[in-house]
Amino acid sequence: MSIFKSIPAVNLQALLALGCFGLCLFFARVVRRISEGTIPGGAGSILYLRALIGFLFAASIALGLASFAGIDVLKGGIFLHG
């Protein structure tokens, strides 16, 4: 894990934001396939996955904007210490 110690924390945060957005796209495709009937599932699983997509999308937006602003929210850098 020494490769992650050499990368700045804000860049890791941006990478995590991209990962969350990628998971949003994956689960959106799963919801579409459940709706088409290709994958078994019902209305409850679609509701659960849509809620998961919402949380992942909100996390990707928050992490992405914070990384553009240079704020490290993963280590609690958004709060004022003192």
Image: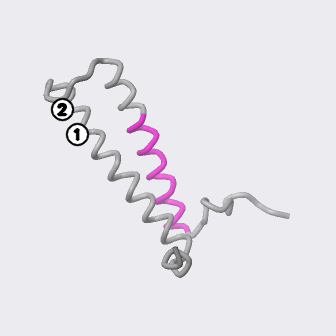
**Height in image: 5 above or below 52?**
below
Q: Residues within 10 Å of mark 1 (few under 14, many from 20)?
A: few
**Height in image: 49 above or below 9?**
above
Queried whether the magenta region covers residue 40, the answer comes back as no
- Magenta region, mostly helix, strand or loop? helix
Tell me which amino acid carries mark 2.
Arg
**Quadrant hosting residue 70:** bottom right
Write the residue at 27% across / 18% down.
Answer: 42
Write the residue at 53% across / 70% down.
Answer: 10
Write the residue at 60% across / 60% down.
Answer: 74
Could you say where residue 16 lies in the image, as x and y percent from the top left? 45, 60
Tell me: 53 left or right of 2: left
Question: Rounded to the nearest whole Å, what is the CA distance between mark 1 and mark 2?
Answer: 6 Å
Tell me which amino acid carries mark 1.
Arg
**Height in image: 25 above or below 80?**
above
Which residue occupies the extreme top position in the image?
43
Camera-side residue of 59 and 6 = 6
Could you say where residue 29 lies in the image, as x and y percent from the top left? 22, 39
- Quick check: marks 1 and 2 in contact, CB under 8 Å? yes
Magenta residue span: 52-69
Which residue is identified by label 1? 29
Write the residue at 34% across / 45% down.
Answer: 24
Q: Which element carries disc 1, helix, strand or loop?
A: helix
Which residue is identified by label 2? 33
Could you say where residue 9 lies in the image, as x and y percent from the top left? 56, 71
**Which quadrant: the C terminus?**
bottom right
